[in-house]
Image (tube, coloured by chain):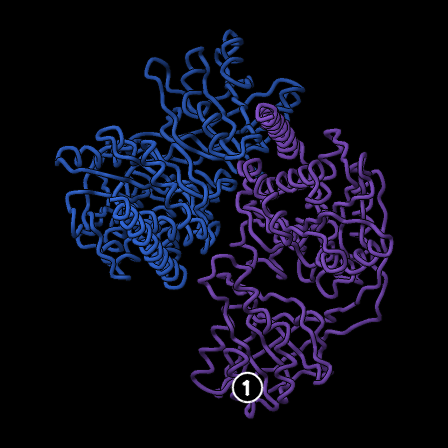
Chain colours: A purple, B blue
Amino acid sequence: MKKIVFLLSCLAIVASAFAQKDDSLFIKNLSDFILTKGQAYENLRHLTKQIGQRLSGSAGMYKAEAWGLKTMKEAGADNAYLQACMVPHWVRGGKDEATTQSGNGNKKSLDVLALGNSLGSSKPVTAKVIEVKNFDELETRRNDVKDKIVFYNYPFNQTFIKTFEAYGDAVQYRGAGASRAAKYGAQAVIVRSMSESTDNIPHTGSLRYDTAYAKIPAVAVGLQDANWLSDALKKGSISVTLSTHGKFFPDTVGHNVIGELKGSEFPAEYITVGGHLDSWDPAEGAHDDGAGVVQTIEVLRAFKALGYKPKRTLRFVLFANEENGLRGGTKYAEEAQAKGEKHIFSLESDEGGFTPRGFGLTGSDAQFQKLLSWQPLLTRYGASEMSRGGGGSDIGPLNRTQGTPTAGLSPDSQRYFDYHHARNDVFEAVNKRELELSVVNMAALIYLVDKYGF
Amino acid sequence: MKKIVFLLSCLAIVASAFAQKDDSLFIKNLSDFILTKGQAYENLRHLTKQIGQRLSGSAGMYKAEAWGLKTMKEAGADNAYLQACMVPHWVRGGKDEATTQSGNGNKKSLDVLALGNSLGSSKPVTAKVIEVKNFDELETRRNDVKDKIVFYNYPFNQTFIKTFEAYGDAVQYRGAGASRAAKYGAQAVIVRSMSESTDNIPHTGSLRYDTAYAKIPAVAVGLQDANWLSDALKKGSISVTLSTHGKFFPDTVGHNVIGELKGSEFPAEYITVGGHLDSWDPAEGAHDDGAGVVQTIEVLRAFKALGYKPKRTLRFVLFANEENGLRGGTKYAEEAQAKGEKHIFSLESDEGGFTPRGFGLTGSDAQFQKLLSWQPLLTRYGASEMSRGGGGSDIGPLNRTQGTPTAGLSPDSQRYFDYHHARNDVFEAVNKRELELSVVNMAALIYLVDKYGF
């Protein structure tokens, strides 16, 4: 008996070694294809330069959907289709402007950008500025806020190594700052941009109004101007005249763009890989999330080109409306639930088209161990750092509705908030090989999950 | 006895845990200091924007040496000084130009840059172009080479994950291509740039003439122009008129710039950390190797600012003449040998100011295990990938003369050859946090080597 167990163990080890070698070879083929015959970079060029911004409800959204569907088909999807959902339709409505005036009459124009979902005022707002470092200070000085413009000057904590930690720490001022200030009678807010870049470019992004309070104008200000304003306020009173024009049109129809490769053994088990198709209006949305979009399509394209027949059904999804509503991701999970689809794994790329470092996983301990067991296969392609907690906004609903484990590609984070939601998030800020290497790791992970289950 | 052994083991484990915690805390302090009070980025701005190119023998070299000495003192060196060495003095001598002419009379200007150390001709060279893929093809077609311009069109192998592997594979055409072609009577060579960028910027770098053959002109050509030329040659004969003006002045005196922190316990044991001060003439030398220079100074500055008293003597060295002679690194090792200095470790940063990924080590198995044992302390700061083989050109002589283990910082390599030896290697191509995070890891490694020996 002992001998049989020993022999079986030997066979298992040998079989595992062969499997590992097969996997290693297939992943090398994926890598060679993506790095030498890749289309991700040229697809990104088209999406950013020929279509450009594609905020929910905009003409760009419709163009991007049509392009996405066509490109998904060209990449070789067995089936490609649109999944409709209602999306909000916010527009900037004009040029955002802010001019300071000091006590001595000196004026200075600030580089500002209205926050997404914010409403403009019917006419320019002029008021004195009160700077607060954080919400605690706002509460302490709440009696000084009435009729003022509140300036939230909360910087990124630069001691965090991963910039997403600094973003997570600071973004509450963008999201909730306007209503917190409106509660005490502020006329508008200026928020230090969610960035730690060395330039002065403002970064937009969503706010959420609390309907209990006035929906006051809200802008992000570039970091150099934020520092200037803070210094100027130390010397004396400053008033600002602010013009913004944001407004909502009625909700409209947007679409998730979906491509499928049908599973050969377990077609009723689904694996989703995706990024979001919408982007903020001031830029081309190259890193956020054009990268995730073209990477998703490229995984499909590479599988098809190499003749890979997945065991499980693979879904390649370009999600609608991640930026200001999350209606696409929500719809996708709702329909999956309604149809009784079993989603065993989902992967999202929404942290920029930078060099790959690893994956983050929201799943069980056993699932994390499984991910770790694949680390040796991925390390040479750059995805060596596996962490707990991952998967982006668009696949979160799958996790919440049916417990699907979610993973997020983790590219290097240092440059992301230099470009995030800002006018410099353009094609030229993406490096071809960095973009492609991340695809290699995404494709390899999907291959392993498909082959071994999760 | 067993109990005593057990107790001693427990004590050792507890002591080791305390040490690990101390190390972790100190490295966190280094990180916080470098990321929030760092001067590396502003020092790089000065070096690139106020001094700029600093090729051996140029006015820039002298300015850079003076700046380096001053900055090393300001950073807190116990002792800072210049170490003289003779350096070559090559100059470009004028604008490099190449114009093609097709059979139909059409002309096109190519974006070219003479290779470093190459000699210009007294008047423009006009000749027909023969393209070869590699040296094998050159040998096969050696009878067709006479009086021609040989065009080496050997591309980077994009299937290599680390770009330095592709560079290592291709760089022989830049280094030896001119003499190999001159052997068969070629009048000049055009070499496809050592790059895999998406732009057309040519990349210079050293060649070495074989004194047995004519020292013919040699230029690097941008990748788009290389592809154009290759396509054009498929359609018919092309001649090129080439003007270059490179020449040597007599060797002159350059200097290594050295700062020291004296060891408190083992002052006769030396640890060297460095980068090279010289840079090619077409650009600002921001990644190559302004980054290594300011990182080296920043390690010193951080130790001093945190009041760290090294056990061993730390040498911070800005090496002279890495690019076209290696006279600085050679001199440093010679003097160390002559003075009987015992160099236990050396670290170089000369792969660009990008986000850190790890260290490469040239040393014994035991030394590599020691490096691996520190991986848990460094991983969170980005240096998670330890590899065998490392340490750059400038510290190689220390290894060769006294067996000093050498390590090289390995930043992410994907973007490096987009900028290497090219006019776009400018300050703006360096990201502040990426530069600083690499300093954190360099400082942490030097601290660990100093504390525990190597």
- When asked about the image quadrant of residue B271, the answer is top left
Q: On the rendered structure, is B29 left or right of A374?
A: left
- When asked about the image quadrant of residue B301, the answer is bottom left
Label 1 neighbour load within 10 Å: few <14, some 14-19, many 20+: some
Q: Nearer the viewer, residue B99 or B438?
A: B438
The x, y position of residue A88, in whole percent, is 79, 67
The x, y position of residue B371, in whole percent, is 36, 41
Q: Chain of mark 1?
A: A
Q: In the rendered image, which quarter contains the N terminus of chain B?
A: top left
Give above or below for B411 relative to B152.
below
The x, y position of residue A112, in whole percent, is 60, 71
Q: Which residue is mark 1?
A: A139
Which residue is found at the position 67% from the left and 82% from the top? A124
Kind of residue sitting beneath label 1: Glu
**SS at badge 1:** helix
Residue positioned most to the left: B339
Residue positioned most to the top: B143
